[in-house]
Image (cartoon, grey):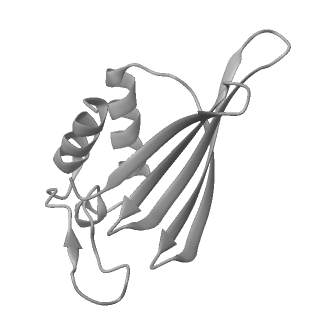
Amino acid sequence: GVFDTTTELVGAGNALLYQVYLMGKLFQSQLTTLTSDADGTVRRTRSAQGFAGGLPRYQSFYRERKVDREEFYATMISTLAEYGVLKSDTCTWIDNPARNPPVIDTGLQPGITGCETHLEESFDL
């Protein structure tokens, strides 16, 4: 693949550190933490930091819930339509993070098919 990744259980065994490397440099760092609230509901919270060429580019925060495959794809398709995301901007990526060659192309086809290809490959890891 295009990326190298590492995954490590951290903290009291309730947190997962997942890091993505591109051309030997940190590209994204994610921390996912599992907690339980007073009624026993398990919650999954994830934060991510993105980097390009060693420089910080973005930060994100997610509250996640577990869904089955059908609900996941139906919700994703609905959200893409709701926000008017172009097919050409969906699940494909060509970038030059270091601002010099080589340009990195995932080879994914734009649109939901590219998303499914990428996600299904990820699930097989």
> Is 99 situated left or right of 116 in this image?
right
* Residue 15 screen position, x and y as percent: 65, 32
* Residue 103 screen position, x and y as percent: 22, 79
Can residue 30 be seen at all in this image of the molecule? yes
Q: Quadrant of residue 25?
A: bottom left
Q: Residue at x 30, y 65 (%)?
A: 89
State which quarter of the image contains the C terminus. Answer: top left
* Residue 79 screen position, x and y as percent: 42, 45
**Relative height, residue 36 to residue 122 (above, below):** above
**Relative height, residue 35 to residue 27 (above, below):** above
* Residue 2 screen position, x and y as percent: 24, 59
**Relative height, residue 1 to residue 42 (above, below):** below
Q: Residue at x 51, y 70 (%)?
A: 51
> Is 81 situated left or right of 26 in this image?
left
Q: Quadrant of residue 6?
A: top left
Across the whole image, how many numbered discs are drawn on residues? 0
Q: Residue at x 23, y 87 (%)?
A: 101
Q: Residue at x 32, y 22 (%)?
A: 70
Task: Determine the residue located farthest toward the right in the rendered image.
Answer: 38
Task: Determine the residue located farthest toward the bottom in the rendered image.
Answer: 100
> Is 43 situated left or right of 112 in this image?
right
